[in-house]
Image (cartoon, coloured by chain):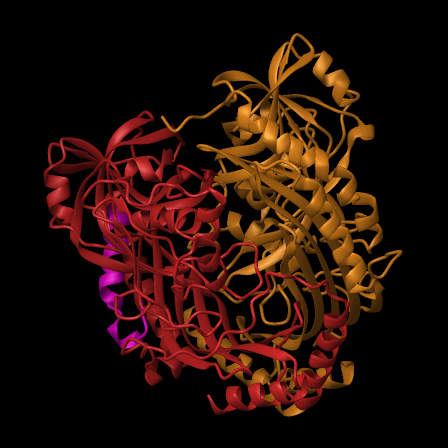
Chain colours: A red, B orange
Amino acid sequence: MKEHRKTCAEIFRLAGRVRAEVTISSSDSALTRFADNVISQNVAETSVSVSIKLTDKGRVFRVSLNQTGGAALADAVARALAALKLQKKEKGLLPPPAPKPLPSPAPGLYVPSTAALEPSFRAAKAADLARLCRPKGMKCYGTVENGASRLTVANNSGVFASHRETCALYSVTVRKGEGYGWAEQYSPDAAKIDYAGVNARAMEKAAASARPAAVPPGKYTVILEPAAAADLLLFLGYSGLGGRAWLDGRSFASGALGRRLMHPSITITDDALTGPAAGAPFDFEGMPREKVVLIEKGVARAVVHDRRTAAEAGARPTGHALPQPNPYGPLPQNLEMAAGDSSLGEMIRSTKRGILVTAFHYTNLLRPKPVEMTGMTRNGTFLVENGRVTKALKNLRFTQSVVEALGRVEALSREREVVYGWGRMCVPAMKIRDFNFSSSTGF
Amino acid sequence: MFELCEEAIDVLSSRRADFGDIRVVRTRTQALGVRNGETGSVDDSETLGFGVRVLLGGAWGFASSGLLTRSEIRRVSLLAVEIARASAALMERRVRLAPEPAYRDFWQTPFMKDPFSIPIDAKFRTLFEADRLMRRDRRIKSATASMRFVREHQWHATTEGSRIEQVLLSSGADCRATAVEGAQVQERGWPCSHGGQTLAMGYELIDQLDLPGHAEKTAAEAVALLKAPDCPSGEMDLITYGNQMALQIHESVGHASELDRVLGYEESYAGSSFATTEKLGKFRYGSPIVNLVADATLPGGLATAGYDDDAVKAQRWHIVKDGVLSGYMTNREFAPRIGLNRSQGSCRADGFANIPITRICNLSLMPGSAGSLDDLVRDTRRGVIMENNKSWSIDQRRLNFQFGCEIGWLVENGKIKKMVRNPTYQGITPAFWGSCDAICGPEEWRLWGVANCGKGQPPQTAAMCHGSSPARFKKVKVGVKAG
C-alpha cells in the first residue's frame, strides 16, 4: 500500500490544482496449464497499471501507464494536462467525490501463503491428477492458478481506498473417449481448495459420459449445476441490473421495479461486503459499495447505481461505478442468488424426465430486454428419467429468455458455489421446467 | 533496446536453453468515445515491458515484468528458467521447435497519417458530430461514437540470433445507435459491430469511414427496426453481408484450424476442433467454390507483420482449398506434429506480459464469380440477407453455431422485399460451408477487422482480419426462436 500511496502523492503533486483521480492496480500472478496429461504452459506475471483521470472546469481526460517512476508519471500527467485543454466543456461532468467512510472488507480475502506459492506447487497439483488419469485411460486438461493483487482508488479531494486480495483457482477437464467431465473451485486461500474433490468430480463425470446418446431438441426440465446457473445470472446482471441500461429502457427491469417478474423463490443480491461473493468494499470512484437487493422473492426491487446514474434516476448511489467515464454505466460484480431448500440429489430424484447440465459453453446474448441467450451444454450433460440419471447425452444448444426461465424455477439447492469470472457470483443449483433447447450437435 | 535484451539472452544461453527469447514491447493506445453528447470514454495509454520465454530440457517456462532494468531482466529470466524446470516434472516428450533461419530486420505497418499526430480535439469533433446526427429521434436512447489507435513497438531477440524490430499500427472507429420502444431494443452500427472497423492503417481509415456521413442512416435504420417484422423462421437461402461473414469465417474456420486446439491444447477452456489432423488434405470442409486463405502479408490485415512472435517470417497459405481442408494455423512447437518442416508463422502474444500462442492469422474467403450483390439477389428466389454480427456462439468443437445479426432483408423472387428484425441463423460447420453455392466477385470483396479475439489461459486478446464478398448458403435454418 505504501508504494501505491507514494505514486498517488506524486501524481497529485504533478497535477497541481487540477482535480486528479488515480486508480492503481498491481498484481503478481502465476498459472500452470496442462493438457494431454502434461504441462503445456507455465507462466508468471508481475504487473502494475496506473490510470490518471484529470478534470478541470468541465473538461476530462485520462491517461494510463504501467510504470511508476517519476519521469514516466511526469510525462503522463503532462500529456493529460495538455490534452485536457483541448477537451470540450461538459455540463454534466461530476467533480471527483469527497471521501466517505468505507466499510471493512470481508475477512479472509488476502492469504499470504496463497500469494507465495511456487511453480513446483502448481506442477505437483497437475502431476497428481495426471497420475490418477493415466492408468484409467483418461486425459486431463486444466489450470492451477494463484496470485495476489491490490487495487487503490484515490483522488486529491481526499479519497484513498485500497484493497488487496489473493486468488487461487483450480480448474479441471477430464476426457475419457468421447466423455468429458469438468470441475472447478475458487478460493482466496489455496489451502481451502479441495484438489482431490475437484479431481474426483471431473473424473466421475468423464467416466459417466463416455458414450453419450442423442436426444432431440425441444423443451425439457433442466437441472443446472451452479456453474451453468451462474452463466444465466451473469447475463441477467450484465444486461439488466445496471443503472445505465435501466435508465435507457434496455433492461428487463425498466419500468418494472416493484413488479413480480420471476418465481417467488428467486432473490438476487449484490453484496461485496459480507457474502460469499465479497470483494473490494469500494467502487472505481472510491465510493463505498452497498449491499443491494435486486430481485426479492421474484419482485424487481432495484438496480445498482454510480453517482451519475443515481442522479439521473433520483436514487442513491450504491457504489457500483466502473472507471469513469464509460458508456456502460454501473454494473453488479458480486452477485449472489439466495439458496433454496433442495439439493442436487433431490432435484434429480423429483424429476420424471429432464436434463442435468454441468456447464454451458460460449453463451451470448441475442435480445437484451428479455435477456434471451444462446449457448451450448458442455463437459457432462445427462438424461434424468424417473428420478435417476440414466444416460449421458450429446450436447445441445439452448435459446432461452433468462427472465422467463427464472419464472419457471421449481427448486434451488441449499448448497451454493462461488463461481469466479466477471467478478464473483454465488449460485445454487437450479431446476427449471420448459427450458428451450433449440438444436443439437453430434458429440 | 537490443543491448538490454542481451541480458536475457546471456542468462538463457548460460543455462543451456534449447531455445529462449525476450520480447520488449512498448504499446501506445488511444481510445476515445462519446455517448449522448458527452465524453463516453477517454484513455491515452502507454505500456512498456518484457517477456522472457525459455525452452529448457524440452519444457517451457515464461515470465514477464513491466520494469525494464538489467537486474529485473535477469531476475525474470531466472524465474522463467525455474518455471521451465517445474514444467519438466510433468512431460511426456521434449518439445522440439521447427527450424527457422535467424533474421536481423526491421518491419513496420505502412500508413499515410499517423493517428497519434492528429490532435485530440479534432478526433472528438468528428465523434461528437456523428453522435449529434444520430440523436434526432427521441427513440434513440443511446448514441455512441468511438475511435481507437494502437501502436506496438516490439524488439524481439532469440538465442538463435534473430534480432527483429517491428512497429505495428492499427486504427479503428464506429458509431452506433440504440433505439428503444416498449419491449423492443434495436441496435445499428456503422460500419459494423464489435467496436467497428479496425485495420492496420493510419488515420486515413477514419477519413474513409466518414462517421458523420453515415450517422443519420445508421440511426434511422435502428428506429425502423423497432417496427420491422421479425425474421421468418424456417429453412431458406441465406446471404451473409457486412462483417457477418467475418465472424462466420472467424468462428467456424479460423478457430477450428488452430493446430494447438486441434491437438487438444485448448481443451480446458476454449475447446478443441472437429478438423482433426487425419482429415488434412481429404476432408470436404465446404463446397468446391470455397477457398479460404491465411495471409500474414495482407495489406491492412491486423495480423500482418514481417514476423510472428516465434520469429517466423510472414507467409500466405490455404486453410481450405477448393472446399478441402488444406492447412492449419501453426507455431514452431506444433508444426512438426503434422509433418511440416517449418511453421506457417501464426504464433502471437498479447503485449509483453503473455506467452506467444497459436493464433488465427488474417483469414479470407476468396471472391467467387457471382458478380455483385445485386446480381446475387436477382438470382435468389427466397432468402434473407443478414448484415453485421450482433450475437455469436459456437460449440467447443466448432460445429454447431448460432449467429444473430443487426438487420435482415427478406428476398423474394430476385428482389429485396422488406427489412426484418432479430435475424438469426444456425448451422453445422461442414454442412453450412458445403451449402455455399455462390460467392460474389472481387468488386464486392471487403476486409473486416476482428480486434478483440480472446483465447488462452491467462486470457489473451489478438487482432486479425477476415476478407470476403457476400456469399449465399442454401437451405439454412433461420429465425431461431426462444420457444
User: Where the C terminus of chain B falls, by quadrant?
Assistant: top left
Front-lying residue, B426 or B130: B130
Q: Position of residue B287 (x, y in %)?
A: 64, 24
Q: Position of residue A344 (x, y in %)?
A: 16, 48
Q: Classify residue A170 by image quadrant.
A: bottom left
> Which residue, as the protein is rendered here, is positioned at the far right?
B112
At 60% across and 78% down in the image, what residue appears? Answer: A20
Look at the picture and state if A179 lies above or below A318: above
Q: Position of residue B121 (x, y in %)?
A: 78, 62
At 40% across and 80% down in the image, what residue appears? Answer: A164
Front-lying residue, B300 or B76: B300
Look at the picture and state if B305 lies above or below B217: below
Q: Tell me which secondary structure the magenta stretch mostly adopts.
A: helix
Q: Position of residue A171 (x, y in %)?
A: 35, 61
Look at the picture and state if B483 lies above or below B107: above
| Residue A197 lies in the magenta-colored region | yes
Front-lying residue, A44 or B161: A44
Q: Is residue B318 visible?
A: no
* Magenta stretch in the rendered image: A186-207
Q: Classify residue B175 by image quadrant.
A: top right
Label total for image: 0
User: Where the N terminus of chain B falls, by quadrant?
Assistant: bottom right
> Is B88 positioned to the left or the right of B301 in the image?
left
At 77% across and 60% down in the image, what residue appears? Answer: B169
| Residue A269 lies in the magenta-colored region | no
Q: Is residue A201 visible?
A: yes
At 47% across and 42% down in the image, what residue appears? Answer: A250
